[in-house]
Image (tube, rainbow, N blue to C red):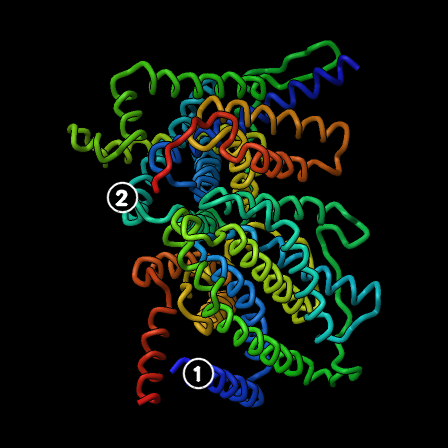
């Protein structure tokens, strides 16, 4: 019984940390740019693919295997560097200030394009990179056996969340971003380069998506269609926590992660259903999520 | 003037329906099938533009599309009801009724929250459907061959029969919707789109109009789902998945909310792009669709309908002269 609770808790925490890294980027981009980015899932998949390509290359070059993490970080960074100018500068910028739902549709179009770009670059075959998963060894907790890499994901999630939160609230550039979130026009009048803030925010969001993808790559077989479920799962997290809120994303990811882990162990039939159920329930009772302040409305 | 305008719309629609039915005899079978599917998707799109007139976009019409499809499918397999006309009609009424039940819940939401809640509902249904093995789980099930007034058409006329039925039923619905759009609640919807609070101050209920619009959209979505299921002869939970809902939003944004025929044209465009690129570029049809979508939003922000409206207004002006 205790074992079972511990299993559910640990499985839930691992799943939640993965979800949190994806959702963190999504919620941050929404907070700053007011864009609910469906293509976020596509960037996630690109991150996974680029890791699946770069890590074998890394081993081929005879690098020490402990440093494989650097290769993974680098592949996520590369994806963000390539995708940000194309998406933000090239496409999304034309739609700023337009209807939010229209922009959602634009990102849906980009998502469709990214789906096929993956197929064109990497083909239809599955790729496997399980080597990085072995570098941290394993951990035994009583009868339970956990791979160290999986548990390290929790650390990564905590680090990402704390780093972004501290950067936003404790640094000067973070304060500038907060000012832009509050009112882009007045920030612009005060001399803030709003376009650059948008670009950087989108870059951070894309990097987090790609990072989640690249650290998930060793756990799964990287293949066509890995992004389609991620989109809605991260939406669910962000909706539960409140769009644009980092603490909200923490709570949202924990709720979904734990609920899903509990379902996997206790009620496997409801595994997929439970996530959307949480999302719908939260929208019905607290449509603005757990962490949304009150807003003035215009007449 | 207004009486003449209506008779004109009525006359033009009947003419268009007859034309389409006649054209259907001469075009190849695959195109008839594609056009039937376009009508099915167009019906759902028509529902979304009904909502769009009131300023809302549903990102979860897969919900009603799936309910309509499964209603027709289960009536066919479980109750042995195979009459296509009856199935379409029952799906329309039943899904519309369900829409009326959930509408008051959804009508409180606006913008992205409306889109997300409708999306959540459709995904809840998806999560349920793929786990019910009695109705095929994620594989879905096959629908029986449909009949028309008790007669089962020969195999080579099956597609055409369904096409004719869908043209007639859709034509009647489109004409009715045109009247609705110009009626008091239909026009209030446009005002809600502009400024909801002022509509309330002027004594109309934005809530009631939204509920009515959602009910209509649900009925249309259900009928579209039933038609799509009957045309394919197969139904699965993919009907309710978010990517399907995305395609419906695509159709309605491409069409714009200004014109009814534009929705069906947009749906036909989507189906043609899909079947052509699916055939010639099987790995990149999504890429083509995505680029097409981005370009159409950039260059046609108010949709194909804005052309249509200008064109038809001109014709009507000339006729009325």
Which residue is identified by label 2?
A89
B283, above or below B27, in the image: above
Percent position of residue B213, x then y:
54, 59
Which residue is identified by label 1?
B3
Percent position of residue A288, x then y:
49, 33
Percent position of residue B75, x then y:
79, 65
In the rendered image, residues at marks 2 and 1 fall on the same chain: no
Q: Give the left or right position of residue B75, taking residue B199 as reference.
A: right
Quadrant placement of the N terminus of chain B: bottom left
Chain for numbered disc 1: B
Badge 2 local density, few (<14 within 10 Å), some, or many (20+)? some
Q: Residue furthest right?
A: B79
At 57% from the left and 73% from the top, the residue drawn is B173
Q: Give the left or right position of residue A111, taking residue B237 as reference.
A: left
A216, above or below B247, in the image: above
Badge 1 local density, few (<14 within 10 Å), some, or many (20+)? few
């Amino acid at each position: 019984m205790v074992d079972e609770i511990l299993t559910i808790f640990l499985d839930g925490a691992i799943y939640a940390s993965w979800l949190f890294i994806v959702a963190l980027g999504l919620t941050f981009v929404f907070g700053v740019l007011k864009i609910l980015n469906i293509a976020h899932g596509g960037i996630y998949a690109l991150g996974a693919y680029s890791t699946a390509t770069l890590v074998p290359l890394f081993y081929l070059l005879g690098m020490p295997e402990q440093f494989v993490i650097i290769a993974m970080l680098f592949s996520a960074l590369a994806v963000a560097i390539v995708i940000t100018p194309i998406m933000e500068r090239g496409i999304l910028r034309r739609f700023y200030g337009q209807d939010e739902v229209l922009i959602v549709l634009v990102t849906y179009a980009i998502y469709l394009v990214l789906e096929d770009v993956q197929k064109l670059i990497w083909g239809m075959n599955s790729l496997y990179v399980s080597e990085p998963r072995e570098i941290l060894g394993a951990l035994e907790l009583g009868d339970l056996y956990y791979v160290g890499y999986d548990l390290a994901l929790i650390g990564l999630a905590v680090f990402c969340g704390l780093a972004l939160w501290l950067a936003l609230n404790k640094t000067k550039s973070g304060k500038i971003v907060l000012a832009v979130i509050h009112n882009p026009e007045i920030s612009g009048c005060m001399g803030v380069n709003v376009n650059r803030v948008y670009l950087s925010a989108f870059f951070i969001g894309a990097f987090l998506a790609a990072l989640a993808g690249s650290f998930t790559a060793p756990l799964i077989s990287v293949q066509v269609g890995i992004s389609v479920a991620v989109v809605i799962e991260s939406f669910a997290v962000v909706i539960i926590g409140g769009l644009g809120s980092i603490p909200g994303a923490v709570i949202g990811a924990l709720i979904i992660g734990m609920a899903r882990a509990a379902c996997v162990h206790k009620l496997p039939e409801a595994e997929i259903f439970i996530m959307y159920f949480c999302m719908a329930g939260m929208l019905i009772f607290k449509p603005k999520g757990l962490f949304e302040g009150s807003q003035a409305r215009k007449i | 003037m207004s009486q003449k305008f209506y008779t004109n719309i009525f006359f033009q629609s009947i003419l268009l329906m007859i034309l389409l039915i006649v054209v259907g005899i001469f075009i190849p079978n695959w195109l008839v099938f594609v056009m039937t599917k376009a009508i099915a998707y167009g019906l759902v799109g028509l529902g979304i533009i009904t909502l769009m007139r009131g300023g809302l976009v549903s990102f979860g019409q897969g919900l009603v599309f799936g309910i309509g499809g499964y209603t027709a499918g289960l009536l066919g397999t479980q109750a042995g009801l195979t009459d296509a006309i009856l199935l379409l009609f029952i799906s329309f009424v039943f899904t519309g009724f369900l829409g009326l039940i959930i509408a008051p819940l959804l009508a409180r939401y606006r913008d992205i929250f409306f889109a997300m809640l409708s999306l959540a509902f459709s995904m809840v249904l998806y999560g349920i459907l793929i786990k019910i093995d009695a109705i095929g789980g994620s594989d879905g099930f096959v629908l029986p061959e449909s009949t028309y007034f008790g007669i089962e058409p020969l195999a080579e006329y099956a597609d055409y029969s369904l096409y004719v039925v869908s043209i007639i039923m859709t034509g009647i619905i489109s004409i009715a919707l045109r009247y609705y759009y110009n009626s008091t609640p239909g026009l209030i919807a446009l005002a809600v789109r502009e400024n909801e609070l002022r509509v309330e101050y002027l004594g109309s209920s934005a809530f009631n109009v939204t509920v009515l619009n959602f009910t209509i959209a649900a009925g249309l979505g259900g009928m579209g789902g039933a038609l799509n299921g009957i045309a394919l002869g197969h139904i699965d939970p993919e009907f309710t998945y978010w990517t399907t809902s995305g395609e419906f939003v695509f159709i309605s944004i491409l069409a714009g909310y200004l014109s009814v025929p534009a929705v069906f044209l947009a749906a036909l465009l989507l189906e043609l792009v899909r079947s052509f690129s699916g055939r010639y570029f099987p790995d990149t049809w999504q890429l083509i669709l995505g680029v097409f979508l981005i370009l159409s939003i950039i260059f046609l922000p108010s949709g194909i309908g804005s052309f249509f409206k200008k064109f038809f207004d001109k014709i009507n002006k000339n006729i009325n002269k």
